Image: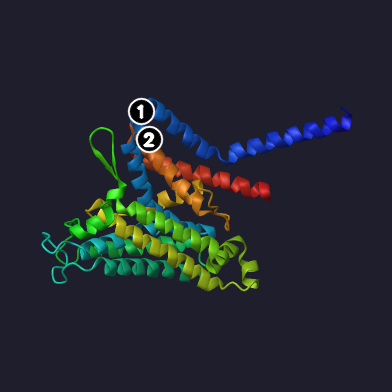
């Protein structure tokens, strides 16, 4: 072999090693989480039991809509700190409008139980309105989304505290939900009932199906519509997008409004899933959503993100928080772990950006 061939082979080896090193570093968080999950699976066989996997699936479906919504805000190099409170207020409104007619301490006794489709329209529209409010202040006044959504979070929490005091509720948990509402969300079709091998039944609730359909819809919006293309263009380079004819104000408001609509749907689902709603419903849901997005590769640099990555991020985050209690991890440490995950994932994200520059 000539000296030139040897030199080329050495360079090729270095490049391959560098690629492998970059791949490992850039995906370090997912690798660590998989290692933790693998360790738990070996030491706690119940972790991979059918019942545990169904639980993981339902938790993923419950938290996925918020992540799908907030991801668009991150693509625009922003965020949304009001997501959890938007979920909370739409959950409490859903519960109050869909209490059983004979429920004790019915919040609004004079209106009965509203039709489910009407309540869905109300809470999704309210969520979209909250999102549009955020988007307007971000785009029109060039305020940072962190500041705008922090202010909105505080406003929504105040409204939520006042709402749970209204009517006949007097600040109590809003419960006694209509059976039809509960069945619509947490009921299950016969085709999604399986034997667990121990004489019992495993049931996949309806809201898992809704989450799959919602994910497909968001994939279509992101990848097959002009709105989706404009969103990514705006996130990647606002000035270039503006020159290309993208309506910056309209697109920004639409992205935040779509996020708000997702929060409204999540609130509707969460209300029936937990069946007892208070002013703390939805607390810190935005942290889970942001962590899931950055794990899934949605970049705070802007203009980068995939629906498949968001789904993977939500699954991985839920996987960790299902696994850790099985090995004796104190539940009180979960917020510190979430904070560490967000910090580590953002550091890796920024590393990728700096390498590209």
Camera-near label (1 vs 2) is: 1
In terms of secondary structure, where does tag 2 sit?
helix
**273 displayed left or right of 310:** left
Residue identifier under label 1: 44
Kindly check if marks 1 and 2 are in contact, taking CB atoms under 8 A apart as contact.
yes
Name the residue tied to disc 2.
Answer: 323
Does 64 sit above or below residue 102? above
Residue 206 vertical position relative to residue 45 in the rendered view, above or below: below
Closer to the chain start, of discs 1 and 2, is 1
Question: Residue drawn at (56%, 45%), measured in percent from left and top?
Answer: 347
Q: Residue furthest top?
A: 43
- The residue lying toward the viewer, choosing from 110 and 290, is 110
Question: Label 1 neighbourhood size at 10 Å, few (<14), some (14-19), many (20+)?
Answer: some
Residue beneath the point at 29% across and 65% down = 159
Q: Position of residue 19 (x, y in %)?
A: 67, 38
CA distance for labels 1 and 2: 9 Å
Viewer-nearest residue: 93 or 53: 53
């Amino acid at each position: 072999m000539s000296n030139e061939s040897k030199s080329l082979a050495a360079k090729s080896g270095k490049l391959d090693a560098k690629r492998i090193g970059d791949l490992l570093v850039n995906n370090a968080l997912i690798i660590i989480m998989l290692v933790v999950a693998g360790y738990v699976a070996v030491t706690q066989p119940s972790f991979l039991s059918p019942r545990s996997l169904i639980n993981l699936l339902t938790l993923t479906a419950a938290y996925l809509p918020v992540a799908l919504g907030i991801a668009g805000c991150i693509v625009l190099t922003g965020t949304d700190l009001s997501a959890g409170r938007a979920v909370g207020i739409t959950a409490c409104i859903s519960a109050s409008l869909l209490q059983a007619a004979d429920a004790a301490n019915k919040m609004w006794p004079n209106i009965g139980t509203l039709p489910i489709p009407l309540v869905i329209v109300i809470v999704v529209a309210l969520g979209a309105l909250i999102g549009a409010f955020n988007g307007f202040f971000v785009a029109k006044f060039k305020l940072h989304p962190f500041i705008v959504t922090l202010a909105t979070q505080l406003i929504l929490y105040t409204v939520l505290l006042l709402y749970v005091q209204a009517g006949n509720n007097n600040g109590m948990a809003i419960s006694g939900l209509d059976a039809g509402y509960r069945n619509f969300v947490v009921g299950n079709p016969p085709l999604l009932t399986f034997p667990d091998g121990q004489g019992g039944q495993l049931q996949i609730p309806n809201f898992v199906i809704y989450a799959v359909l919602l994910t497909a819809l968001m994939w279509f919006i992101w990848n097959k519509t002009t709105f989706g293309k404009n969103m990514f263009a705006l996130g990647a380079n606002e000035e270039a997008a503006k020159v290309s004819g993208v309506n910056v104000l309209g697109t920004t408001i639409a992205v935040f409004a779509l996020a708000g609509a997702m929060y409204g749907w999540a609130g509707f689902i969460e209300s029936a899933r937990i069946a007892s709603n208070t002013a703390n419903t939805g607390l810190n849901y935005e942290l889970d959503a942001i962590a899931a997005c950055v794990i899934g590769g949605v970049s705070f640099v802007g203009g980068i993100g995939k629906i498949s990555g968001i789904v993977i991020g939500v699954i991985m985050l839920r996987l960790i928080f299902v696994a850790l209690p099985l090995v004796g991890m104190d539940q009180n440490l979960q917020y510190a772990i979430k904070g560490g995950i967000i910090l580590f994932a953002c550091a890796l994200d920024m590393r990728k950006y700096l390498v590209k520059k």
